[in-house]
Image (cartoon, rainbow, N blue to C red):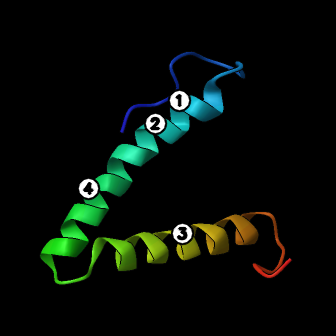
């Protein structure tokens, strides 16, 4: 995965990160379908894991 397009905080930093993470998530979806999961099952799992990770990083419950 590539890092930020430039040093420091800049307006599109979050968008740049999403672009690079998306490529990895699409690869994970492809791998999950090869393993027998549907893309929808895998996408939902990724979404739920992302919410849990975000909540953990922010030190709050995923239900908040």
Is label 4 in a helix, a strand or a loop?
helix
Distance from disc 4 to disc 3, alpha carbons, whole Å, reads 15 Å
Q: Position of residue 50 (x, y in %)?
A: 58, 66
Is label 2 in a helix, a strand or a loop?
helix
Do labels 1 and 3 touch, CB within 8 Å?
no
Residue displayed at 34% across by 51% down = 24
Distance from disc 2 to disc 1, alpha carbons, whole Å, reads 5 Å
Kindly identify which residue carries mark 3.
Answer: 47
Kindly identify which residue carries mark 2.
Answer: 19
Q: Position of residue 13 (x, y in %)?
A: 63, 27
Residue displayed at 63% across by 34% down = 14
- Earlier residue among tags 4 and 2: 2
Q: Position of residue 16 (x, y in %)?
A: 53, 29
- Earlier residue among tags 4 and 3: 4
Kindly identify which residue carries mark 4.
Answer: 27
Is label 3 in a helix, a strand or a loop?
helix
Crowd class of label 1 (few under 14; some 14 to 19; many from 20; radius 10 Å): some
Kindly identify which residue carries mark 1.
Answer: 16
Q: On the rendered image, what quadrant is the N terminus found in?
A: top left
Q: Position of residue 46 (x, y in %)?
A: 47, 70
Do labels 4 and 2 touch, CB within 8 Å?
no
Distance from disc 1 to disc 3, alpha carbons, whole Å, reads 19 Å
The residue nearer to you, when weighing 58 against 15, is 15
Q: Is residue 39 above or below residue 4?
A: below
Q: On the rendered image, what quadrant is the C terminus found in?
A: bottom right
Crowd class of label 2 (few under 14; some 14 to 19; many from 20; radius 10 Å): few
Is label 1 in a helix, a strand or a loop?
helix
């Amino acid at each position: 995965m590539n890092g930020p397009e430039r040093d420091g905080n800049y307006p599109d930093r979050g968008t740049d990160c999403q672009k690079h993470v998306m490529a990895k998530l699409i690869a994970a979806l492809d791998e999950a379908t090869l393993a027998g999961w549907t893309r929808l099952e895998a996408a939902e799992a990724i979404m739920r894991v992302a919410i849990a990770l975000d909540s953990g990083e922010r030190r709050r419950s995923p239900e908040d």
